[in-house]
Amino acid sequence: MFLKEAIAEAVRQGIKDLILLCGRIFLLLALLTVIISVTTSWVNSFKSSQVYLKEEEEENEKRQKLVRKKQQETQGEKASRYIENVLKPHREMKLKKLEERFYQMTGETWKLSNGHKLGGDEDLVLESESQTSFETSNREAARRRNLPNCLTKVSPPAEQPRQKEVLNLPEEPPETAEEVVTVALRCPGGRVLKRRFFKSCSSQVLFGWMMKIGYHPSLYSLSSSFPRRPLEVEGGWSLQDIGITMGTVLNVEKKEQSS
């Protein structure tokens, strides 16, 4: 009897332990499920945040590329406008000044004047010829009427323009040559031109040089800088004879027109 009760008690205890073990197993499984669920959600949220950050970085990079492209286009347009409105006119003006200076130095300033279109003045020529013919007829009639008194004045022949003088300046000597002097001409516009001559050269070469750069001796004269006085030049005098033995600056001055 006692044995049966012990066996029954052992069976009940075993069942109880089995139930507790199953409960613990179920509890452990539930805990694992919760842990797995939490971990999975955390991993998924981390991945989604990483994807979002990556997409945001790509979007920012695209926006930055667009901004840089617009800035480059704006800078290119500004550079083009600067070249067109500033550099190009400045370059053209500089080239024009160099061209004017070259023609003034060579005495070909006539090339700087604007030409006339061929045949453009035909009407003026015809009108001038008609006026000349009319005046000639009037003078002829007056001459016949007043022939005994000889009152009609004969107009003097028109002065023929002189041919352009051919200027032949001596070849410029090198700086290392002996008996060489440097002469500088200060023009009315402030431009200063320099040239070397031998001291034995004729003093007339100064006027030839002045004429070659576009200042005719009939309208302009040369004077020393200090003391300021007209340069005295004679036909047979050399540069050394008129006192030019070292570097000298001469002023090109316009002559006063006599009334």
Image: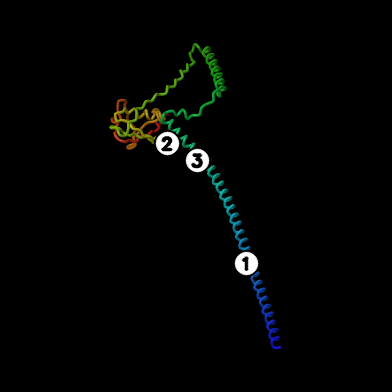
Query: Of marks 3 and 2, which one's residue comes earlier in the chain?
Result: 3
State left or right for residue 158 relative to residue 60. Answer: left
Within 10 Å of the Cα at label 3, are there few (<14), some (14-19), or many (20+) other Cα atoms? Answer: few
Disc 2 vs disc 1: which is toward the camera? 1
Within 10 Å of the Cα at label 1, are there few (<14), some (14-19), or many (20+) other Cα atoms? Answer: few
Residue that numbered label 2 is attached to: 189
Residue that numbered label 3 is attached to: 87
Residue at (49%, 15%) from the top-left corner? 152
Disc 3 vs disc 1: which is toward the camera? 1
Query: Of marks 3 and 1, which one's residue comes earlier in the chain?
Result: 1
In what element is the residue under mark 3?
helix
Q: CA distance from mark 2 to mark 1?
A: 92 Å
Residue 88: percent from left, percent from top: 51, 39
Q: Amino acid at mark 1?
A: Thr
Residue 140: percent from left, percent from top: 53, 14
In what element is the residue under mark 2?
loop
Residue that numbered label 1 is attached to: 39
Residue at (44%, 28%) from the top-left corner? 108
